[in-house]
Amino acid sequence: MLVLRFLIVFMLLLLPATAFAEDNAKKGAGASEKLKTLVLEPVTVTATKREESLEKVPASISTVSDTQIEEMGAWKLGEVLDTLPNVWMKNATSGDGIVIRGLSSFDTSIYSPVGLYVDDVPYPVTYMQNLLFLDVERIEVLRGPQGTLYGRNSEAGVVNVVLKKPDNQVRASVFSDYGSYNTLRAGANVSTPLIKDKLFLAGNFVRYQTDGYMHNEYKDDDRAAKDESMRGRGVLRWTPTDAFDLRLTMDASHTDKGIGRLRYETGSNATKRFNVISDASDDAEENVINPSFTAKYSGPAVEVTSITSYMDYRYQFLSDRDRTSTFKSYSDQDLKQQGITQELRFASPGKQRLNWLFGLFGSSTRSDIQMNAISSVSKASTYADTDATESSWAAFGQATYSILDNLRLTAGLRGEYALAHGGQTHRVGTTSLVGYSKELDSFEVLPMASLAYDVTPNVTAYATWSNGFLAGGFNYYAADSLSTFYYQPEHTTNYEVGLKTNWFNQKLIANVSVFYTDIRDKQVREEDPAGGIGVWKFTNAGRAHSQGVEVELTGKPLAGLELQGGLGYTYSVVDDWTVNQNGVPYSYKGKRLPWAPDLTYHLGAGYAHPCGLFARADLYGAGTQYFDAENSLSQEGFALVNARVGYAFKQWELALWGKNIFDVDHATKKVRDRSRNVLVEDGAPQTFGASLTWRF
């Protein structure tokens, strides 16, 4: 039924364009131009830290171009990732996070098993992962452990966001959107040469604000889920010679949003969809400053790349813990983190029989986190102040050797040493402060190997083995003793085979991959029966595994018409995890991992006519997913349909859009309170709007 709706929507969007198409066809066009518009352009990716053809990379990798992002009307990273097989954005007020192949971190973790990089610069904190877009050139998503090249916190995969670089071309645009719930997005992009062939400057800015779709009945507030965000970026690029490319970047963002989306679904405090009854104005504020410097030398014998980055991050929130109209308890958090990273890479130039890469990496991070739970019963209030320092050093290398013209062997190895020291002072009620500390260190060896065979020039088969890990850390959120304060690293080993194919003279690309991922020392969150009120123990379970398949299709059957399709299936399950519940052992064996939809799928169709008319429709969805370890809280499968239609003039572009146009009810999070009542966060409803863009 939803597929039928999708087709109806797309055909309705195309109706105005068909009349223009018929008239334009009579005018004719050159044969070469027709051929060009009927061919899918080759895609080059850099997520493997060197330029490679997308169809030759021996891994499950997806790309989304700037044109696709614009046609979809996507404003944030999650809107794009949700359309890719076995990729999902966990969208919750407790923190967004990227899920790949069923792997995610527990709900209050600072770090994610998916590495996020913007122009090779790491964005390590989970809260940062649903980026507001700025002048994106393309997005690359590598599935499976990427430990050899990326190290820690990339055990599920890597998302690489590539932004447009300033050059000799003058580019400028101003854009704005307005839609339901008083939603406004406005911004500008500019790029210009200061000295031809030598010095270039770019600047980008975007502001996004919305009243949100949640209403607080108790306070009669329609802005319980407001979002006021802005992000800016400046780039100065210097190319003193053909061999050197130096780039200084400043990226900064600010977000002030309401996080009052969690409502009671059952119990005496239950409310209807999009309504809460909180006595507090739940609010979160995030500030990020992220300067970086990239230097690249391209010589006849070696290419050298240096990437230096600094991050100053702060996240604060105030939240009503009981989610009722009566004052019972609040919680507030103040997270501050500063970190610096340095990577130095050496690589063979061009394409040779032996292509190699060697690199060194170092990072140092300091975190200060204060967490308070204020209760109407003073003896139940808690206070925790956590300080942590983390450092890591790594050396890595990877090489690809062409055994035959159509047979390539790739092997790589990374050695990474990590050292972390954390300390916490904790108090319950009026008791004395209790202090404890822990030092964690580990040395990880992360090998990989793959074999790629070109069956024909248009068909490549591959097999890959890779490893990754999610670093251990500290329970800043709800510890009360040394035993509940820390947890160890999590490890993954992935086995994968795939087939990449190109059909009908570059008119259809079809890729498939099958994988099995072994997960050891799985990081989990469990309630500590020996602890105080609201004490969670973050620990390492025994084992789990994830297995599945990804299929992606991209086709261009007609000039101006491009079709995309994707299907992902993941079976991610616990193999060994037993806990103590009131003195009785309880096994989670056979339970599905939380935040892991078993199905993800997408159908997309976009049409652009030379006259200026364009239209696009996207259907994407997810199968059943669970929100807790017991698998007692779930969201059944659902699918959403988005659409956009407009007209592009020489400099102006006007479009109308709709998101979740059939208003499908779905949950993005569910939890239970101590009385076993269910609370839910509602997914975004049906919204409509218009956009206007001026390019000059």
Image (tube, rainbow, N blue to C red):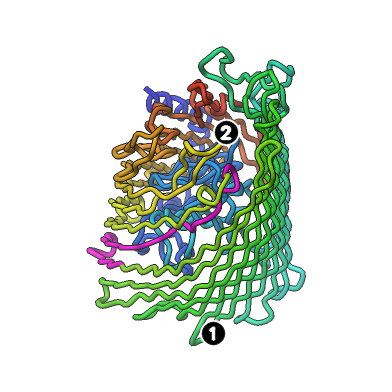
Q: Give percent across and percent down for residue 489.
A: 45, 57
Q: Residue at x 27, y 75 (%)?
A: 405
Work out whether mark 2 precedes mark 1 in sequence or the reverse, and give the earlier one: 1
**Side (left or right) of 269 relative to 226:** left
**Side (left or right) of 626 relative to 608:** left
Q: Is residue 527 above or below residue 267?
A: below
Q: Which mark is residue 145?
A: none
**Side (left or right) of 646 relative to 560:** right
Q: Is residue 498 above or below residue 685?
A: below
Q: Which mark is residue 533?
A: 2
Q: Residue at x 54, y 67 (%)?
A: 419
Q: Residues within 10 Å of mark 1 (few under 14, many from 20)?
A: few
In terms of secondary structure, where does tag 2 sit? loop
Q: Residue at x 38, y 55 (%)?
A: 144
Residue nearest the observer in this picture, 360 or 82: 360
Q: Is residue 174 above or below residue 459?
A: above
Q: Residues within 10 Å of mark 2 (few under 14, many from 20)?
A: some
Q: Which quadrant is home to the N terminus?
A: top left
Mark 2, mark 1: which one is toward the viewer? 2
Residue nearest the observer in this picture, 660 or 149: 149
Q: Amino acid at mark 1?
A: Gly
Q: Was residue 451 drawn as part of the magenta stretch in this picture?
A: yes
Q: Residue furthest bottom?
A: 301
Q: Amino acid at mark 2?
A: Ile
The quarter holding residue 499 reads bottom left
Q: Tell me which segment is drawn in magenta.
A: 450-479
Q: Which residue is mark 1?
A: 299
- How far is mark 2 from mark 1, CA to CA? 62 Å
